[in-house]
């Protein structure tokens, strides 16, 4: 697994696929890792490279005291892309990865040719914001891990596969407290409205899994041109529960926009 060190933090990443069309920079959600995108790589990697990052605090990357805001995570992703020799990307962000994708677009260091949001809080709903604030308060009170496990059990999915459910929930709960609390704060305070409206030339696909994470009405107001797709039969991890469904939407989006 390749690694790059930036600002003293060692970051691990995986490369999948074959050079050709625009590379996909794949950013996982909180408690996950870059290898989550391997199923998509098997379906989308025939003619493009997928750069799959273990974001700081996750997987085989370092877990420093901080910071963990979306702009810091975006700077990490930029360092990974420089190391991988990639400068033009479509950013695919799941959950936490969505705000990081928007931070990359705002920073303008990479040539972001498109954004794919996988059930991510681009414009977080009031209900999800309140739930995540409860999580933040629980971490501040010292009982964050138990509350987090209970919270995430409602969105994991795999209702007919207990082993997959248990494995995903166990992985989610491996993130250290000093990582999770600032990650949650970064998501709750994130709002993509200004960045999205300032970049109408960057195609946007939001794939919704019915988790009520992104306010679809606000998204339509900010970017009426955005593509919004809905998966069926999955929870918050559609790229793992039903990768073929997600890959078909992503492939059509990329093809239609010449990416």
Image (tube, rainbow, N blue to C red):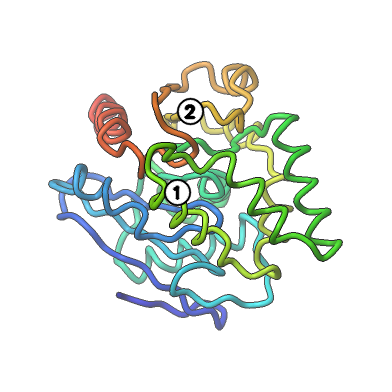
Q: Secondary structure at mark 2?
A: strand
Which one is nearer the viewer's eye here, 48 or 197?
A: 48
For the point 45% across and 22% down, the residue is: 228
Which one is nearer the viewer's eye here, 60 or 7?
A: 60
- Separation of disc 1 and disc 2 at Cα? 20 Å
Q: Residues within 10 Å of mark 2 (few under 14, many from 20)?
A: many
Visible residue check, residue 87: yes
State the image coordinates of residue 232 (x, y, percent, origin top left). 39, 24
Q: Which residue bears the numbered disc 2?
A: 208
For the point 15% across and 49% down, the residue is: 20
Q: Vertically, is 18 above or below 57?
A: above
Could you tell me which quadrant the N terminus lies in? bottom left
Relative horizontal placement of residue 211, taking residue 246 as reference (left or right): right
- Please tell me which of labels 1 and 2 falls first in the chain: 1
Q: Secondary structure at mark 1?
A: helix
Relative horizontal placement of residue 251, taking residue 115 as reference (left or right): left
For the point 69% across and 61% down, the residue is: 145
Visible residue check, residue 115: no
For the point 67% across and 53% down, the residue is: 148
State the image coordinates of residue 259 (x, y, percent, origin top left). 26, 36
Looking at the image, which residue sits at the far bottom?
8
The image's mark for residue 165 is: 1
State the image coordinates of residue 91 (x, y, percent, origin top left). 41, 46
Q: Vertically, is 259 above or below 186?
A: above
Q: Vertically, is 111 above or below 64?
A: above
Relative horizontal placement of residue 220, taking residue 16 as reference (left or right): right
Which one is nearer the viewer's eye here, 123 or 203?
A: 123
Which of the 4 image quadrants contains residue 179?
bottom right
Looking at the image, which residue sits at the far right?
141
Q: Residues within 10 Å of mark 1 (few under 14, many from 20)?
A: some
- In this rendering, the count of numbered labels is 2
State the image coordinates of residue 42 (x, y, percent, origin top left). 19, 49
């Amino acid at each position: 697994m390749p690694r790059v060190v930036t600002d003293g933090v060692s970051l691990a990443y995986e490369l999948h696929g074959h050079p050709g069309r625009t590379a996909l920079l794949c950013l996982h959600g909180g408690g996950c890792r870059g290898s989550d995108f391997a199923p998509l790589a098997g379906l989308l990697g025939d003619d493009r490279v997928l750069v799959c990052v273990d974001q700081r605090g996750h997987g085989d990357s370092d877990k420093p005291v901080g910071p963990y805001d979306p702009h810091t995570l975006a700077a990490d992703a930029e360092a990974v892309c420089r190391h991988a020799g990639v400068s033009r990307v479509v950013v695919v962000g799941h959950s936490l990865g969505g705000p990081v994708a928007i931070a990359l677009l705002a920073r303008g260091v990479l040539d972001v040719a498109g954004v794919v949001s996988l059930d991510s809080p681009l414009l977080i709903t009031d209900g999800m914001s309140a739930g995540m604030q409860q999580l933040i308060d629980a971490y501040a009170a010292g009982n964050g891990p138990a509350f987090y496990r209970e919270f995430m059990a409602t969105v994991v999915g795999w209702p007919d596969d207990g082993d997959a459910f248990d494995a995903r929930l166990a992985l989610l709960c491996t993130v250290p407290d000093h990582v999770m609390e600032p990650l949650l704060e970064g998501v709750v305070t994130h709002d993509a409205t200004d960045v999205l409206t300032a970049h109408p030339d960057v195609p946007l696909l939001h794939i919704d899994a019915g988790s009520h994470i992104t306010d679809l009405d606000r998204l339509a107001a900010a970017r009426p041109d955005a593509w919004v797709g809905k998966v069926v039969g999955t929870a918050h991890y559609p790229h793992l529960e039903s990768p073929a469904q997600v890959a078909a939407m992503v492939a059509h989006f990329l093809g239609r926009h010449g990416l």
